[in-house]
Amino acid sequence: MTRTITRSYGDYETARSVVERLEESGISSSNISIVGRDAKTGETNAEEGAGIGAGVGGAAGLLAGLGLLAIPGIGPVVAAGWLASTAAGAVAGAAAGGLVGSFIKEGHDEDEAHYYAETVRRGGSVVSVRAEADQVLNVEAILDGATPLDRAERTAQYRQEGWTRFDENADPYTRGQVGI
């Protein structure tokens, strides 16, 4: 049975290195997704970022397919993989909760989905992996080996700041704002 395992990271570079390690360990790029705010891409128009994979992410595997996607409430993100495709489809179809809906579709509960979307909104990055039962321990070791953000701790911090859930109608965080 396939299980979706997701972790959030404070910066895109860490998430990018996690994707590289996953692929090096034999996880198919078709089972990996990354969505994040990469400071190198700036806060630019999503159309300007089409095909940035090799320049931003690497020359092979999932990272070669990176592109920019504008997500309501988040703004431009660097994204690749099935999660990005699902979010892009939801955004293009004006479906509510594009990124949140993508996480829920992959089996995350609503609280987790809102947390992951908010983390990306605040400048973090998320790596999500579809793992078969025999891959779960390896995938978790790689994801956890890169010191992901502590979801319970971050959720508590967000709530102390008045956050209750991801709001796709909110203005995206910009450089200089307090982030993750």
Image: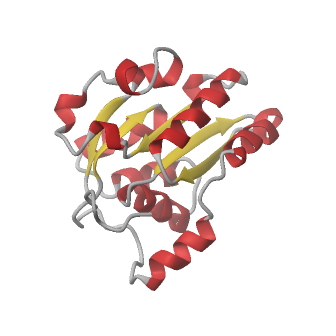
Compared to 141, does 99 lie above or below? below
Could you tell me which quadrant the N terminus lies in?
top right
Could you tell me which quadrant the C terminus lies in?
bottom left
Image point (55%, 53%), residue name? 8
Say which of 88 and 35 sits in front.
Answer: 35
Where residue 140 appears, x then y in whole percent?
Answer: 74, 44
Residue at the far top: name it: 59
- In the figure, residue 53 lies in which quadrant? top left
Image point (49%, 64%), residue name? 115
Residue at the far front: name it: 176
Side of 28 relative to 135 (left or right): left
Compared to 150, does 83 lie above or below? above
Where residue 104 appears, x then y in whole percent?
Answer: 50, 55
- In the figure, residue 131 lies in which quadrant? top right
Side of 117 relative to 46 (left or right): right
Image point (39%, 64%), residue name? 179
Say which of 61 and 57 sits in front.
Answer: 57
Side of 39 relative to 104 (left or right): left
Compared to 176, does 62 lie above or below? above
Side of 137 relative to 15 (left or right): right
Compared to 115, does 161 lie above or below? below
- In the figure, residue 143 lies in which quadrant? top right
Where residue 175 appears, x then y in whole percent?
Answer: 27, 57
Image point (51%, 47%), residue name? 126
Colour scheme employed for the rendering of this structure? secondary structure
Where residue 33 appears, x then y in whole percent?
Answer: 51, 36
Could you tell me how many numbered marks the image carries? Answer: 0
